[in-house]
Image (spheres, rainbow, N blue to C red):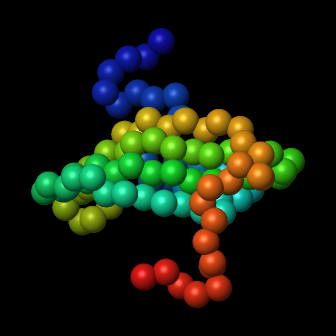
Amino acid sequence: MPTGPSWSLTTPNNHAQIGAARSHRADSLTLLSVAKNFRAFAGNRIGARFENELHGDSGQWYRGRGNENWKFEANGLMQRRFASINDPFITQANRKLRWDRSTPSD
Protein backbone atom coordinates (compact mmCIF):
# COMPACT_ATOMS: atom_id res chain seq x y z
CA MET A 1 0.00 0.00 0.00
CA PRO A 2 1.37 3.47 -0.83
CA THR A 3 2.51 5.56 2.09
CA GLY A 4 3.77 9.08 2.58
CA PRO A 5 2.40 12.56 3.07
CA SER A 6 0.75 12.89 -0.36
CA TRP A 7 -1.15 9.57 -0.32
CA SER A 8 -4.80 9.38 0.64
CA LEU A 9 -7.71 7.00 0.01
CA THR A 10 -10.18 9.74 -0.88
CA THR A 11 -8.39 13.07 -1.30
CA PRO A 12 -7.85 14.24 -4.90
CA ASN A 13 -4.29 15.29 -5.74
CA ASN A 14 -4.90 18.01 -8.36
CA HIS A 15 -7.55 20.50 -9.47
CA ALA A 16 -8.95 18.22 -12.23
CA GLN A 17 -9.47 15.38 -9.73
CA ILE A 18 -11.11 17.80 -7.29
CA GLY A 19 -13.61 18.89 -9.96
CA ALA A 20 -14.40 15.28 -10.88
CA ALA A 21 -14.86 14.27 -7.23
CA ARG A 22 -17.15 17.24 -6.52
CA SER A 23 -19.22 16.53 -9.63
CA HIS A 24 -19.72 12.88 -8.64
CA ARG A 25 -20.60 13.71 -5.05
CA ALA A 26 -23.07 16.40 -6.09
CA ASP A 27 -24.97 13.80 -8.13
CA SER A 28 -25.44 11.49 -5.16
CA LEU A 29 -25.63 13.73 -2.05
CA THR A 30 -27.43 16.97 -1.23
CA LEU A 31 -25.79 19.22 1.35
CA LEU A 32 -28.40 21.03 3.40
CA SER A 33 -26.55 22.71 6.25
CA VAL A 34 -22.95 23.46 7.12
CA ALA A 35 -21.33 25.20 10.08
CA LYS A 36 -17.58 25.97 10.21
CA ASN A 37 -15.61 27.38 13.11
CA PHE A 38 -12.21 28.72 12.20
CA ARG A 39 -9.75 27.77 14.94
CA ALA A 40 -6.39 29.15 13.82
CA PHE A 41 -4.63 30.82 10.92
CA ALA A 42 -1.08 31.84 10.16
CA GLY A 43 0.52 32.75 6.86
CA ASN A 44 -0.95 30.49 4.18
CA ARG A 45 -2.57 27.97 6.58
CA ILE A 46 -6.03 27.75 8.17
CA GLY A 47 -7.44 25.26 10.69
CA ALA A 48 -11.19 24.74 11.04
CA ARG A 49 -13.75 22.54 12.77
CA PHE A 50 -16.95 21.77 10.87
CA GLU A 51 -20.29 20.02 11.02
CA ASN A 52 -22.70 19.45 8.13
CA GLU A 53 -25.89 17.57 7.36
CA LEU A 54 -26.71 16.01 4.03
CA HIS A 55 -28.81 13.29 2.50
CA GLY A 56 -28.38 10.87 -0.37
CA ASP A 57 -30.64 10.09 -3.29
CA SER A 58 -32.08 7.22 -1.23
CA GLY A 59 -33.18 9.67 1.49
CA GLN A 60 -30.58 8.49 4.04
CA TRP A 61 -29.36 11.36 6.24
CA TYR A 62 -25.75 11.86 7.39
CA ARG A 63 -24.07 14.24 9.79
CA GLY A 64 -20.49 14.96 8.85
CA ARG A 65 -18.17 16.44 11.43
CA GLY A 66 -14.47 16.82 11.78
CA ASN A 67 -11.38 18.99 11.53
CA GLU A 68 -9.70 20.46 8.47
CA ASN A 69 -6.29 22.02 7.87
CA TRP A 70 -5.81 23.99 4.66
CA LYS A 71 -2.62 25.22 3.00
CA PHE A 72 -2.84 27.73 0.13
CA GLU A 73 -0.58 28.58 -2.80
CA ALA A 74 0.58 32.17 -3.33
CA ASN A 75 -2.13 32.65 -6.01
CA GLY A 76 -4.87 31.72 -3.51
CA LEU A 77 -5.60 28.20 -4.77
CA MET A 78 -5.73 25.45 -2.19
CA GLN A 79 -2.48 23.48 -2.22
CA ARG A 80 -3.32 20.86 0.42
CA ARG A 81 -6.30 19.88 2.53
CA PHE A 82 -5.98 17.50 5.43
CA ALA A 83 -9.24 16.42 7.00
CA SER A 84 -10.49 14.00 9.60
CA ILE A 85 -14.19 13.40 8.87
CA ASN A 86 -16.86 11.17 10.41
CA ASP A 87 -20.15 10.71 8.49
CA PRO A 88 -22.52 8.71 10.72
CA PHE A 89 -26.07 7.91 9.62
CA ILE A 90 -28.80 9.97 11.30
CA THR A 91 -32.56 10.20 10.95
CA GLN A 92 -34.27 13.36 9.78
CA ALA A 93 -35.67 13.75 13.30
CA ASN A 94 -32.08 13.83 14.67
CA ARG A 95 -30.98 16.77 12.53
CA LYS A 96 -29.43 19.62 14.57
CA LEU A 97 -28.44 22.21 11.97
CA ARG A 98 -31.74 23.91 11.27
CA TRP A 99 -32.19 27.61 10.65
CA ASP A 100 -34.26 29.93 8.51
CA ARG A 101 -32.79 30.05 4.99
CA SER A 102 -35.26 32.63 3.64
CA THR A 103 -32.68 35.41 4.06
CA PRO A 104 -28.93 35.34 3.38
CA SER A 105 -26.68 34.88 6.40
CA ASP A 106 -24.11 37.50 7.40
- Whether residue 24 is visible here, answered yes or no, is no
80 or 58, nearer to the observer: 58
Q: Which residue occupies 61% across, 38% down?
A: 87
**Seen in the image, is 82 located left or right of residue 46?**
right
User: Residue 63, position in %: x, y?
Assistant: 62, 46
User: In this view, which residue lies farthest toward the right?
Assistant: 58
Q: Which residue occupies 57% across, 54% down?
A: 52
3 or 60, nearer to the observer: 60
User: Residue 6, position in %: x, y?
Assistant: 35, 31
**Seen in the image, is 59 located left or right of residue 1?**
right
**Seen in the image, is 4 located left or right of residue 106?**
left
Q: Which residue occupies 58% across, 87% down?
A: 103
User: In this view, which residue lies farthest toward the top?
Assistant: 1
User: In this view, which residue lies farthest toward the left?
Assistant: 43
Quarter occupied by the C terminus: bottom left
- Whether residue 41 is visible here, answered yes or no, is yes
User: Residue 88, position in %: x, y?
Assistant: 65, 36
97 or 47, nearer to the observer: 97
Q: Which residue occupies 49% across, 81% down?
A: 105
